[in-house]
Image: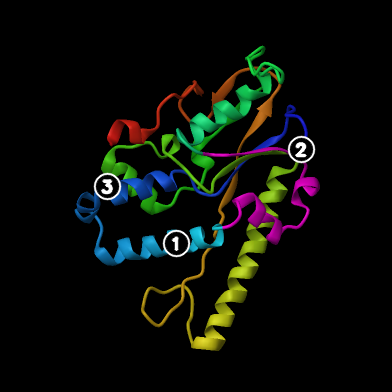
């Protein structure tokens, strides 16, 4: 991997806030049942479980290599970091700020590059949105796992190729299930299989030549600030 430079595209790989949603679901199941049916909660637990099983022994970035071998070089990946505590916003700040660290001392000697970004460009599942509404939580400040921020030279092409590869494999699995068990994807009944994109991906910003970190999908814009807390710190 290389250096962050102006014009590189920022991609979010995976879904934000999933670990935080799991924690909230475990700690406050009765509150969730005030809004969701047991069947719906069971479906979401299974969906989460499928992703965890796929990533049990490897990271999301490693799983991408199965879909797009050699993707790091092909799409010019300069940097990739996992999103964790504090969610996308905390990780994005750290992603940029650590470029200004002295490699010998670990001290901040310059601010690091800037960016323009849009949170509304990031795919968030309906379940995550509704749980965050229930707990009045911001999904972009929520503990995440199996979620990565990448800076790439060819981010839009990467996203298109990844989603196309995932859809192709999803359809192959659907046909295999149908041929073997008579299960057809896309329905909720007991005699149907569910096929889905394991790793959503989207371009949500770009690296800029200045040091400003501007969110562009709010009226008048808003600047990214250093995040110290996760939403779980406030709720739990």
* Residues packed near mark 1 inside 10 Å, few (<14), some (14 to 19) or many (20 plus): few
Q: Nearer the viewer, residue 213 or 221?
A: 213
* Residue plotted at (69% across, 43% down): 155
Tag shown at residue 49: 1
User: Mark 2: few, some, or many residues within 10 Å (few <14, many ≥20)?
Assistant: few
Secondary structure of the residue carrying tag 2 is: loop
Q: Give the magenta range.
A: 57-83
**Earlier residue among tags 2 and 1:** 2
Query: Mark 1 and 3 residues: CB-CB less than 8 Å, in contact?
Result: no
**N-terminal-most mark, 1 or 3:** 3
Q: In the displayed image of the protein, which residue is found farthest to the front?
A: 104
What label does residue 1 carry, if any? 2
Measured as percent of width and height from the top left, residue 94 is found at: 57, 27
Callout 1 secondary element: helix
Q: Residue sitting at 62 percent across and 26 percent down? A: 96
The C terminus: image quadrant: top left
Neighbour tally class for label 3: few under 14, some 14-19, many 20 plus, Cα within 10 Å: few
Is residue 95 located in the magenta-colored stretch of the structure?
no
The quarter of the displayed image where residue 187 is located: bottom left
Rendered residue at 64%/19% (across/down): 106
- Distance between mark 2 and mark 3 Cα atoms: 39 Å
Q: Compare marks 2 and 3 and give the one earlier in the sequence.
A: 2
Magenta span includes 72: yes
Q: x, y percentage for residue 200?
A: 56, 53
């Amino acid at each position: 991997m290389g250096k962050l430079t102006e014009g590189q595209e920022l991609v979010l790989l995976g879904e934000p806030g999933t670990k935080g949603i799991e924690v909230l679901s475990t700690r406050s199941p009765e509150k969730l049942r005030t809004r969701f049916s047991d069947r719906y909660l069971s479906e979401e637990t299974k969906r989460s479980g499928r992703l965890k099983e796929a990533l049990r022994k490897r990271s999301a970035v490693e799983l991408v290599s199965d879909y797009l071998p050699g993707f790091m070089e092909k799409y010019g990946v300069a940097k990739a970091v996992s999103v964790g505590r504090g969610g996308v916003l905390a990780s994005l700040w750290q992603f940029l700020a650590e470029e200004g660290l002295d490699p010998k001392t670990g001290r901040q000697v310059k601010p690091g590059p800037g960016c323009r970004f849009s949170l509304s460009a990031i795919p968030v599942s309906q379940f995550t949105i509704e749980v965050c509404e229930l707990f009045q939580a911001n999904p972009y400040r929520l503990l995440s796992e199996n979620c990565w921020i990448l800076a790439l030279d060819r981010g839009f092409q990467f996203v298109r190729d990844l989603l196309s590869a995932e859809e192709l494999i999803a359809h192959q699995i659907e046909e295999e299930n149908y041929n073997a068990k008579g299960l057809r994807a896309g329905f909720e009944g007991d005699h149907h299989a569910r096929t889905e994109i394991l790793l959503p991906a989207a371009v949500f910003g770009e690296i800029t030549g200045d040091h400003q970190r501007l969110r562009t999908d709010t009226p008048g814009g808003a600047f990214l600030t250093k995040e110290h807390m996760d939403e779980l710190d406030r709720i739990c």
